[in-house]
Image (cartoon, rainbow, N blue to C red):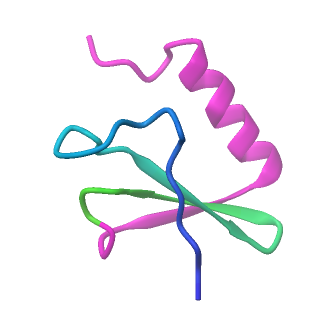
Amino acid sequence: MTQWRKSSRSGSGAQSDCVQVADLAGNFGVRDSKDPAGPKIALPSAGFRALLEAVKRGEHDLP
């Protein structure tokens, strides 16, 4: 069974919606916590690191 987890920096309660990740044997799974049965993506380690760096730089922030 896949073990999904969220950041320890995510809040708790109704305002704690976040992205969850899972270790998938060399890849990383990513899903939306609001829709755990919905779409998921799998990224290789390098792609996941690149995504995290882009998020940290604000490249995916909403206007």
Residue 26, given in percent of the width and then of the height, sits at: 83, 67
- Nearer the observer, 31 or 18: 18
Hey, which quadrant is residue 43 in on the image?
A: bottom right
Residue 1, given in percent of the width and then of the height, sits at: 59, 89
Q: Which residues are magenta?
A: 36-63
- Nearer the observer, 14 or 58: 14
User: In the picture shown, does residue 39 fall above or below 30?
Assistant: below
Please name the residue shown 22% across and 46% down the image.
13
Hey, which quadrant is residue 40 in on the image?
A: bottom left
Please name the residue shown 25% across and 57% down the image.
34
**Which residue is at the far bottom?**
1
- Nearer the observer, 20 or 59: 20
**Which residue is at the far left?**
14
User: In the picture shown, does residue 35 fall above or below 53?
Assistant: below
Q: Is residue 40 magenta?
A: yes
- Determine whether, in the image, residue 58 is placed left or right of residue 38: right
**Which residue is at the far front?**
12
User: In the picture shown, does residue 2 fall above or below 62?
Assistant: below
Residue 51, given in percent of the width and then of the height, sits at: 63, 35
